[in-house]
Amino acid sequence: MKEVRQAVLFTVVTMVLFGGAYPLVLWGVGRAVFPSQAGGSLIRRADGSIVGSALVAQAFTQPRYFQPRPSGVDYNAAASGGTNYGPSNADQLTAMSDRRGAFARINRVPDERVPAEMVTASGAGLDPDISPESAEMQIDRVATARGVAADRVRQIMRQHIAPPALGLLGRPRVNVLELNLALDQELR
Amino acid sequence: MALELIAVTVTIAFSIATSIPLGAYMFRVFSGARTIADPVLVPLERLVLRVCGVDAGAQQDWRSYAVSLLASNAVMWVATFAIVSAQHVLPINPDGIAAMEPALAFNTISSFVTNTNLQHYSGESGLSYFSQMFVIVFLQFVTAATGMAACVAAMRGLAGQRLAALGNFYVDATRAAVRILLPLSVPLAIVLMSQGTPMTFEGAARAATVEGASQTIARGVVAGEVAIKQLGSNGGGYFGPNSAHPFENPTPISNFAELWAIAVIPMAMVWTLGHFTRRRRLALVVFAVMLALYLPMVGVAIAQETGSMEGKEVRFGTASSALWAVTTTVTSNGSVNAMHDSLTPIGGLMPMIGMWLNNIFGGVGVGVINMLIFIIVAVFVAGMMIGRTPEFLGKKVEAREMKLASLAMLWHPLAILTGTAVACSVWASTGDPATALGWLKNPGPHGFSEMLYEFTSSAANNGSGFEGLGDNTPFWNVSTGLVMMLSRYIPIIAPLALAGALAAKPSAPETAGSLRADSAVFGFTVWAVIVILGLLMFMPVAVLGPIAESLAVRG
């Protein structure tokens, strides 16, 4: 009987401590110190409406915008996920070949130069970043669609390259949503 | 690529370097010595024990230690099952999540109570914020503490002489949770928040995108869960894609911090073993054996995954994802930062090997327990080879100990191979299984790997998956639920009994004729026993799955 009582009390007290107090304290810290990040890094328009999250990819199909990586879930940030295709899957090989052809065609680059990340879906289908190389290949298309000089677009893109953290961790990357918002802002 | 390799090296080196002082701190906590964190944390520990009515001085033999462990876990199972089944009427549910249906709840609760964190639901749509906090985060603390307590009890048994008691379960579990996991989780969660991991009670954000579409962005009380999921070798993520989701792992810095958190306590446990047995050299030998298995696997995975971006994230790169895939599976963690189903065939074999062995660092606590089992077997094999009575740390290893060690060791392949065989036979005996069952996302050998991986992950209490498997079905929910429970408690209770038996024995002084457990020769023997006994029985399934696929891909 003592065994059962101890087990029940231990469950209750640790549930209150770790399920209740621990998240509440962190929530308080987040609100006080990192209000934007703790709320989901949301980007808002002047009227306060939400454009998206800086950390979450959204679909871009118009030629005037840089495109993010393919998504296995159509950029659904309420049901994220990967394709879970294995490397030997025929459907996967077809999908990759289709994406390669499409990227090469609209950006006027040879098939074999299309970066791997632009023909594969990311783990969550929400990868907000592309590599600087992938962005570079899209510059001419974006500049033509906007009727501006390619160098102007290139200049804005280069300002959005995030280097490896501490010069060591990760790879250089470009946040697609932030870059496209900057284009809209600076190239009216 | 060179920079990525340097980053991998730095990550591993940093984890090892910090595990050494942490191992010393954990020994001081569990042996009741003073530590610098006492003024803050000891009052909290006393509060928990007082509420539970635990006499901190009360000692338990291995049987009553095991009974307390099982009783507490049973009560947690019932309480959390009730919560997820009633989450639709409980508070803090801004997105209106429905109740979890019974078979899925059975699987989910069995998974989290056993520290496995296999997830047949998707976090965004399957759990309310209340359940995320009071079921998932709660269990991620206490089940990690349960494993650490069991490990500490086993270490006491090895170190002690003519010892009747192994400690007190509630004292050990409370210390592990309050004085080790909590003070590491809070700063880690704050680092993650600084990088962009959300911590909000507000429901999903509704965005109108730049091109005018609508996008619903799930968020929630994420940061605290991600911290303890990594530190406690739990691995269960807030969102479906786990740490591949940009909210769970927003930047290369968060990725580094989480990789560190996956490895540091399992590594530190080895040093704690050295402190308990008062043999630093033993800890060094064990650590070297583990590294000699871990580093080659990391190397192979990195080489295989280079250039393969399916299921991976640009911000991490392939090398870091390969390092993660190996680290998360050798440590029984199971969180992922890339989709394992989309790994290359041999790259995907490395996580399976990590789980088949399940003792390279291993889960918090249970990894060292699994390693001790292999050490006992190695002692026995070496003793047979040189014709002496097997001894470990001056204690005779006899028939009872060998039976218990064999039980713990053989259960693992039995569960994996039998489970996979049953699944294959169900699949094969179903007319038109592809449409009737809908289990396998990928055809051919890769489909076999999906089923093999699921039982491997369940038996290793890992929790990662080849997620193409359509696993939210009664068959998978019930079968893996049972495997997770048996594979948690058999390999904990049998070693506790073994430790209890060893604890009662006197320790004979070592002579020139004794087998030295802390020598390089013995280290190599353990390494060889692990590779031959631990791995060879999985050779046939490795050939049927990943190796066959690899040959097919190369054509």
Image (tube, coloured by chain):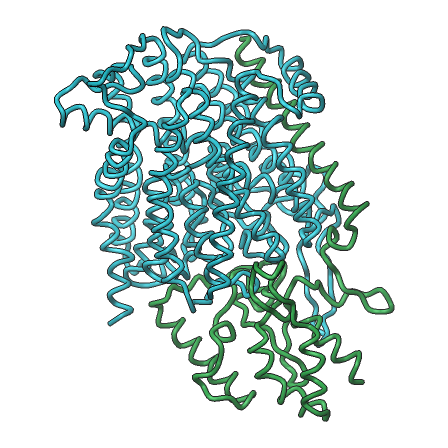
Q: Taking B522 as reference, is A48 above or below it? A: below
Q: Which residue occupies the foreground of this view, A156 or B474?
A: A156
Q: Colour of chain B?
A: cyan
Would residue B459 be seen by someone viewing this image from the given angle?
no
The answer to which of A183 and B520 lies nearer the viewer is B520
Figure quadrant of the C terminus of chain B? bottom left
Q: Nearer the viewer, residue B508 or B110?
A: B508
- Left of B454 or right of it: where is B414? left
Left or right: where B98 falls relative to A100: right
Question: Residue A80 at what x, y percent from top left?
Answer: 57, 59
Q: Which chain is green?
A: A
Position of B496 with respect to B240 (left or right) is left
Residue B239 in view in this figure: yes
- The correct choice, above or below, for B309 with respect to B218 in the image is below
Place residue B37 in its image quadrant: top right
Residue sitting at 72 percent across and 79 percent down? A156
At 71% from the left and 92% from the top, the residue drawn is A149
Q: Position of residue B446 (x, y in %)?
A: 32, 60
Residue A84, percent from left and from top: 44, 61
Most distant residue in the right direction = A47
